[in-house]
Amino acid sequence: MKITKVTPIHAGQFLFVRIETDSGLHGVGEGGSWGQIEAAVAAVAKFATYLEGEDPFPIEHHWNVMHRFSYFQGHAINAAISAIDIALWDIKGKALGVPVYELLGGPIRDRARVYGHVYEKNIDALLAELKRKKDRGFTAVGHINPFLDEGEDQIYFKSHIGKMREAIDNVRRMREVAGDDMDLCIEIHRRLTPAEAVVFARGIEEFHPMFLEDPMRYEDADAMARIADKIHIPIATGERFSTIYEFQALFTRNAVEYARVDVCLCGGITGSRKVAAMAEAHNIMVVPHNPLSPVGLVACLQLDAAIPNFAIQEYSTGFEAGVMKSVDKHLGHDVVDDAPVPVDGFVTIPTRPGIGIDLVDDPAAIRPPLSKPVLMRMHADGSPVDQ
């Protein structure tokens, strides 16, 4: 079998890759650098010059060549590698007539617990959406931000005590609605300094969130470790990591308890299973990141099925066209042939050969390409705010 064509597909806010072979089999994958899709498309096109004419089966070999041929990497490049890698696993599973998890050692579970997204700009709307998610059977919610998802056009300023007390009280109100039969995966989205993160985390300990995600910007493993050393809530981070070595830096510093590996960014199924193995050796749980389409979701589910240290799976109910608004169906459900649906807070692992999903014939006709503008929220002093 030989690869005949590698095609990047920019549909809406998604980057897909379709790989065709001379056997008639094809595979699909998704790239996770949604803020830099144009650059990732160019990287896919470059890798196509290497892959076309090659045997699709030696995936580890291709993964190493794409990462190492120039030693230049980064989010756009590694998103392209990830999408290609997922599509190659899809082809291999289809060729052998098995779901990908069988190629990873076989399943340890047949269902995955999921959490839905809650995006809102004010606390009353957030609590109402939290209640709707609970009524739909979710046993956990994530991307639930006590600092709220206010618009990037809103100038920001709050005093330290006002910022802390308001957010801490918002978590109290979330817990009252959720009760004790629903977990809160608190998302900070890099918004705090290490000092603020410590104050905030200590203030919400009594409400027992499952984890505190991305309390600060992700680049500094030592500062993340400082936070972890001073608080009693587990930290979840890693969704923006594009290499396995960034996770290794966190693990060796005791800076994380939940590894948020993005299958569509950190090297595809090949890269994410390496992260999961390292995490297992450190007794760290894995919470795969997926703010993308059902293609990214089912790639995550193949990993979830095969690793013992899986905790919970992100199930994207919102972020349509980059807008922080909650919805009911999975993001991008209209560009695939079968999007897994939660039942009582769990989704069934797909058992079709390959990753378990396919794209519709022309995704870009359904969702014309979108490009994220270069835009940030501003502080009252004129500086940009991470949000």
Image (tube, grey):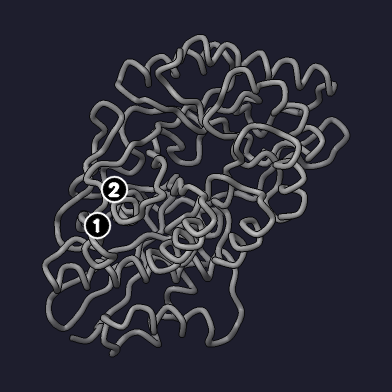
All told, the count of numbered labels is: 2
Q: Residue at x 23, y 29 (%)?
A: 343
Q: Are marks 2 and 1 in contact (CB under 8 Å)?
A: yes
The amino acid type found where label 2 is placed reads Ile
Residue 245: image quadrant is bottom right
- Relative to residue 185, is residue 92 drawn left or right? left
The residue identified by callout 2 is: 366
Q: Secondary structure at mark 2?
A: helix
* Label 2 environment density (alpha carbons within 10 Å; few <14, some 14–19, many ≥20): few
Q: What's the mark number on residue 274?
A: none
Task: Give the percent coordinates (x, y) of residue 193.
Answer: 78, 39
Task: Give the percent coordinates (x, y) of residue 65.
Answer: 46, 85
Seen in the picture, residue 384 relative to 205 is either above or below; the reply is: below
Q: Residue at x 45, y 62 (%)?
A: 277
Question: Mark 2 to mark 1: distance in Å?
Answer: 7 Å
- Relative to residue 293, is residue 375 drawn left or right? right
The residue identified by callout 1 is: 362
Q: Secondary structure at mark 1?
A: loop
Whether residue 289 can be seen here? no
Seen in the picture, residue 362 relative to 159 is either above or below; the reply is: below
- Relative to residue 3, is residue 129 drawn left or right? right
Split into 4 quadrants, where in the image is the N terminus?
Answer: bottom left
The amino acid type found where label 1 is placed reads Asp
- Relative to residue 348, is residue 118 drawn left or right? right
